[in-house]
Image (cartoon, coloured by chain):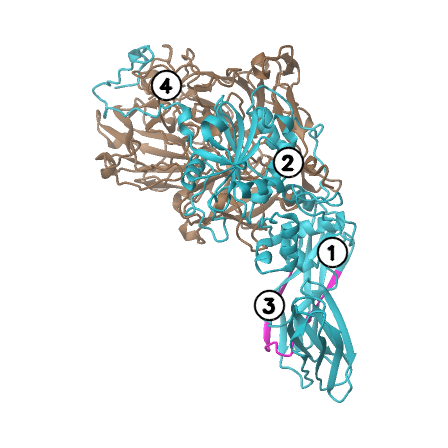
Chain colours: A cyan, B brown
Amino acid sequence: MTFSPAHFKAAALGAVALTVGAAAFWVPRVAHDTRPRTDHFPNVTLITQDGKKVRFYDDLIKGKIVAIDFIYSSCEFSCPLETARLAQVNNLLGDRVGKDIFLYSITIDPDHDTPAVLKAYASKFHAGRGWTFLTGRKQDIDLLADRLGLSEDGSITAAPGADTDGHTPHLLIGNEATGQWLRDTATDNPRFLAHLIADFVDTRGSTTFSGRGGSGQSFDIDSPGQYLFAKECAACHTVGHGDGIGPDLAGIDTRRDPDWLARYIVEPDKVLASGDPIARQLLARYGVMMPNLRVGDQDLTALLDFLRTKTGHGSARPFSAKGDFGLAADPGRAQVVAGAEARFTVTFNSVEGFEGSVRPQILGLEAARGAIGSWSAPTVEVSAAGVTKATYTVLTLLDTPPGDYPIVFQAAAGSIMHRAGAVTLSVSGPPKDAITAALQPDAAVVGVTSCIIAGKATAGGWVKDISTFPDGSVHHLSSKSNGAGSYSIGPFVLQQIGLYHDVLIDTETGGRTALVYRAVAGEH
Amino acid sequence: MPRFDVLPRNAVATLSPAPTAESNQTQQLLDPNLVGGRTGLTGPVEGRPPGPIWAHQLFSAMPPQVAIEVKTQGAQANTSYNPGVPRSLNSGIDPTVPFPAAFHPHFPVQEPNSAWTFNGTFPPKLVIARYGEPILFRHHNGLPTDVTQNNGFGRHTLSTHEHNGHHGAENDGFTGAYFYPNQFYDYHWPWTLAGWTSINTTASDPRAGAPDGKGGITKVPGDWRETMSSHWFHDHMFSFTNQNVYKGIAGMTNIYSALDRGNEAINDGVNLRLPSGTAKDFGNLDYDVNLVIAEKAWDNSGQLHMNTLAFRGFLGDQMTVNFAWKPVFQVERRKYRFRILNASVSRFFVLALSDGSTMVQIANDGNLLPMTVPLNQLDQLGIAERYDIVIDFSRFGLGSTVDLVNLQEQTNGQGPGAILTIAQALAGGSSDPCVGPFLRFQIVRDPAQPDLSICPNTPIPLIPNPDLSQIPVARQRTFTFGDNGKITSNDPITAYTGSGPWGIGVNNTGGGVSGGSQLSADYGRVSAAPRAGTLEIWTLINTNKNWDHPIHIHFEEGQILMRNGSAANVPAWEKGRKDVYRLHPGGSVTIALRFRDWSGMFMEHCHNTMHEDNSMLLRWEIDDAGTPFMRPLPTPIVSPTGVTFESPDDILSGAL
């Protein structure tokens, strides 16, 4: 049987004789999926946040333009951003929502997300009329998620650290009447999402959300952090324009300890889970979880640079869109006696005209147990002319084990990251100038107990206490040793409940020890 | 089985209006169907975004020399079928008889809204191109103005991606730069050799060249080791690519060069004399056959059908080759080259001959290999991948037949299943109707002329890879695909954490040809985007245990350096250059890529079903010191009345 037009017959539609010639292999199976499209969407019963029962196909999507996502109210990942973003889309679409455009967010956690819970969740995001939050039976919702292409097989997302909660942060947008369906990420630019919903699937050639960006010319970006902020933060936060769904971030870099802020941006769920009081305060006040968006190191650097610039603090300059930088660390090997300090100098140079703020970091110090360090400044201004230096000071403890510790200095600017060649911190045994310290009494009630830190130092001179409060702020106390070996710092009354950590007691001659103590609430 | 239909190559003067560097914004009245029934509205005749940013780069330095004009429209009979070969080499098909838009003589003719293709006709279309001879591809959109007139699948807006052309991205078929019915879009394909701005810039190496039509070579600048041979071009419409490609909007391109000339007689020390023919100076198709393999499904009226709601991946149940079901191809007892393309939505194929005899693989993704690889079974062919193979039919007797068999079972849109043996597949050992023989070769005669082609069943060298050893690696990156493509590795040096890298299309089998999780660029990464003229090493890791990801990187071919951490794991047929990389479950691929030559939008973003970002575009610019750097561009927002631009800064209004 040759495929030859000579054998062609203009077959009538409908009746098709599928007998084939002698050289056929077998009678083919006909694709039999000819169900009307409407059968694809299950007509399951769901319950709205107002407690009303609705049928999915008949009541929610038939003949409508819809945007659907799946969320759950206790989600620690992208749902809060997703919902905040959809709230922006809701605003943009105005009063078409509820008329011919309908937004639906369906919970994948119906056991916990009752209509009342969903109603409270919706109100935190200022969800408008025409945006319905839905719950129902778990098996119905699972079926729906599967049919809408919005579920995720947990066995597939086996990557460590991946969302394994079984839903995707995607938005299904469709025009049921014309059968046009597409999916986009639910966290996309809200104007673009509005364009997809109002113009693209509407197919009436409307241009409600045409671009406003002018002639298509390329433009300068002030900083990569600005774009990241726009993409991941602006749905909930402003800088200097008041609270949104989340707090106004003006001045955030001075209000919060930088390390706490960095941790909170990167893994807010873990910070909250550890009982951090600030995180708990924030949740109580705003009612919405700060999502863990898996912000990477480089994104974090860019965001912090942006926030610092935007709030007018620090000397962070706009990020340079061109060139590169390098860094080198010196000395290659720093010798230090346990309990003493070592200093490294990191020299930065600009390549091809790079200018901007670079955030320096260190790797490997945690192996030297107890040692902590600090940079001379949180960011380094690299200029195209000349070199810039930063100092990293390592403070070891008396009980930091002797040994050679490889240290790597790295620095990030936006998403460029470079490392200097490894250097070594070489720690030798503690000096005979030892120091002991203890909190007396050893249990303190906040606001009540008058405490001192007392101990012995083998040498005279100033003795300092550097304490990190539970809220991340740091305070210093000091006292002079009486030269006979004993010293005491204080008296003082602890002001905050919690764990006081990294309390360093050190002497001028380099002896150092560390203390950790806890303050509790008590009855007056 | 019919051969491809060769598109006419016309003089540029035949185009009216004449092509312009910038988009032609002459206004025309709009069909009310496009604008919700409103009358009196106008829109531009050309759908390309306006302005200098979207102008054809180097249009005056590389003016088009050949025009190819097509109109995508609904299925109809072909009254101008040009197979490029005599009837005897096309299984006796008489091209003067109108060729129906039907998958088989006994199938009903496809209604105009069931299948859409270039010029609306079967068989699929072939572009003949030569290096150094820029083509202006004028693509008219002749689809219904009513978007619902699609028989249940497909969208009437189009964007054409030439895969994998080394040209400026305004001509790359950016998925968000689509055009409407009654518009056209001019694509400028210059056909330059990669490295043309930095290597062999004086065009003094005859191996870097094209056939001159007179037995000689026209030299071109660039690295001859980057010569490409077999491409395809297809629709790339935002969110509807898989539907439109399935519906028929796909064709192939044969690129002819001094090395791969399409003439097996010319023996000038450069021409590799691969199976082709001798009658013409170049581009002989006699023994050089394009095969597009895709499986389809039909409704109970025999009309092409697709379930657009099969979000996990759509699988048809009947194999077709060149839009023909149960095809039979007559061959002579000599060597043939087959340029095989997988244009299905979600399927992988594993091909073998029914008698298990040798096929010689000569190219991967259209790039001739450093050494040919004789095989009894081809590696998995993923969506959009191309393998060029040579089969020597002289070992068969006259009147015998041998079949091409698919051994790859697949019942799940998300990834392939088991690979059967030839015996199992022939015995009907799978319930998957696409497993088994699907193309029959009939050996019908001895060749009239001697077979002058060179391609023995033992390995021979073809085109060596570019030597990268002297080029410093500017950057190494690691991308981990799992969980919808989010980056999960936290290594700050080699991994990009956050929202993912830019420019990589993940051809998730759930989304079809170019679907799946697109990892888009992020403004935050502009400064770390590849710099012009540099070499980077990218490691792509698939942590999913169940998904097989084909990943397509536009614009440049890469070399696979390692699989799963070792060079020894790279099979012989992957030692050349590729542009689609398959990440097997739990596997990794390390590739070397260069970024060069073109300014303007570098790579495109935003695919299909799920994308991370609203199509961020980047453009190379040169600063005052002559240093290239990248800048972001606003996104085009397309409508029938014209293209406007969306600045991502808008998202911040009210926030700062």
Region in magenta: A389-411
- Could you say which is closer to the camera, residue A278 or residue A176? A278
- Checking the image for residue A366, the label placed there is 3
Residue B12: x and y in percent read: 58, 17
Q: Amino acid at mark 2?
A: Gln
For the residues marked 1 and 2, what is the alpha-carbon distance in whole angstroms? 28 Å
Q: Which residue is mark 1?
A: A255
Q: Considering only order in the chain, which callout, 3 or 1, is on the residue closer to the N terminus?
A: 1
Mark 1 and mark 2 residues within 8 Å of each other at the beta carbon: no
- Badge 1 crowding class, 10 Å Cα cut-off, few under 14, some 14 to 19, many 20 or more, is few
Q: Is there one chain holding both mark 3 and mark 2?
A: yes
- Could you say which is closer to the camera, residue B175 or residue B33? B33
Q: Which residue is mark 4?
A: B303
For the residues marked 1 and 4, what is the alpha-carbon distance in whole angstroms? 67 Å
Tag in front: 3 or 2: 2
Q: Amino acid at mark 4?
A: Gln
Residue sitting at 61 percent across and 76 percent down?
A400
Q: Quadrant of the N terminus of chain B?
A: top left
Tag in front: 4 or 2: 2
- Checking the image for residue A88, the label placed there is 2
Tag in front: 1 or 4: 1
- Badge 3 crowding class, 10 Å Cα cut-off, few under 14, some 14 to 19, many 20 or more, is few
- Checking the image for residue B77, the label placed there is none
Q: Is there one chain holding both mark 1 and mark 2?
A: yes
Q: Is residue A316 positioned above or below B137 on the image? A: below
User: Is residue B548 inside the magenta stretch?
Assistant: no
For the residues marked 1 and 3, what is the alpha-carbon distance in whole angstroms? 27 Å
Q: Is there one chain holding both mark 1 and mark 3?
A: yes
Q: Is residue A290 positioned above or below A366 on the image? A: above
Q: Is residue B77 left or right of residue B496?
A: left
- Secondary-structure class at tag 4: loop
Q: Amino acid at mark 1?
A: Arg
